[in-house]
Image (cartoon, rainbow, N blue to C red):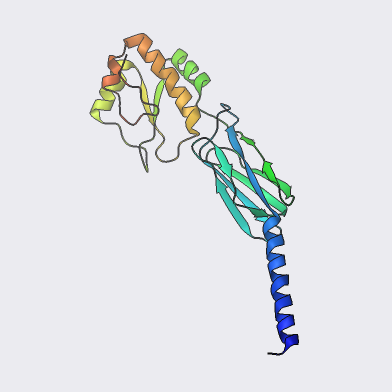
């Protein structure tokens, strides 16, 4: 190899290393927390999709504390989609500058058919329910379930595998549990179905 060829090869190597170093240094971290607009609490079932201008996708999801963080993203414009099961999706455009750590929090909303307010209305109307998620399809109540319903003037309501937002259902059931405790003491807890949402323990 001639001296000129060696020089050109060395120059190309330096150029590629320099470009690689620049691309690495121009990356940005994005982190934050996703909150429920219903309760204000962090959500542990959030998914985020970052779509770059060139169409490349990057993903992140929340942990048990509702927090997320990305791997280093190349700088540039992104469409960001936020999805949480049972909550409204959010789409936004973000511009990531080089060498930054950007915090972006989100609050997602949900429409609750079942909640604490409905539970109080159902109690007043004499038709309170205990909500449960039984599986792929709503399960028919057994003789034991029917006996429980008659004894405590309550109705099991099974969502199958398509429940509403969990925290809304939990608020409904907690209100009904409090009502049953006030009306019947805690003995009813020994015979209630095990798959009701937010099943109470029979500990004092």
Residue at 36% across, 24% down? 155
| Picture coordinates of residue 62, whole percent (x, y) | 54, 41
Q: For this rendering, which residue is in front, 14 or 35?
A: 14
Up-down relation of residue 27 to residue 40 (above or below): below
- Count the labels in the image: 0
Residue 15, above or below 91 = below
* On screen, residue 91 above or below 170: below
Q: Residue at x 32, y 10 (%)?
A: 185
Is 109 or 20 nearer to us in this picture?
20
The answer to whether any part of residue 54 appears in the image is no
Image quadrant in which the N terminus is located: bottom right
Q: From the top left corner, tell me how far across and down residue 8 is, in percent.
A: 74, 81
Q: Viewed as shown, does residue 25 lie left or right of 109? A: right
| Residue at the image point whose x is 52% and y is 35% from the top | 65
Instruction: Determine which quarter of the picture holds residue 87.
Output: top right
Left or right of 155 in this view: 97:
right
Residue at the far front: name it: 3
Provide residue 114's location: percent of width, then percent of height: 50, 27
Task: Left or right? Give the position of 144 relative to 3.
Answer: left
Residue 168 seen in the current view? yes
Q: Quadrant of the C terminus?
A: top left
100 and 36: which is toward the camera? 100
Q: Residue at x 72, y 90 (%)?
A: 2
Of 28 and 127, which appears nearest the observer?
28
Q: Residue furthest left?
A: 143
Residue 48's x, y, as percent?
59, 47
């Amino acid at each position: 190899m001639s001296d000129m060829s060696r020089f050109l090869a060395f120059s190309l190597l330096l150029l590629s290393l320099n470009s690689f170093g620049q691309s690495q240094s121009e990356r940005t971290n994005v982190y934050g927390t996703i909150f429920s607009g219903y309760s204000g609490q962090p959500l542990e079932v959030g998914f985020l999709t970052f779509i770059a201008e060139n169409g490349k996708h990057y993903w992140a999801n929340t942990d048990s504390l509702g927090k997320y963080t990305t791997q280093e993203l190349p700088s540039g414009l992104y469409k960001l989609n936020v999805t949480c099961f049972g909550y409204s999706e959010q789409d936004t455009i973000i511009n990531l500058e080089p060498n930054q750590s950007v915090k972006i929090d989100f609050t997602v909303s949900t429409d609750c058919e079942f909640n604490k307010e409905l539970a109080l209305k159902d109690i007043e109307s004499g038709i309170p329910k205990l909500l449960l998620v039984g599986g792929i399809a709503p399960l028919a109540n057994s003789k034991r379930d029917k006996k429980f319903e008659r004894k405590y003037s309550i109705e099991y309501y099974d969502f199958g595998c398509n429940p509403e937002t969990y925290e809304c259902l939990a608020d409904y059931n907690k209100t009904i549990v409090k009502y049953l405790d006030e009306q019947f003491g805690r003995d009813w807890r020994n015979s209630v179905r095990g798959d009701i949402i937010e099943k109470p323990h029979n500990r004092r």
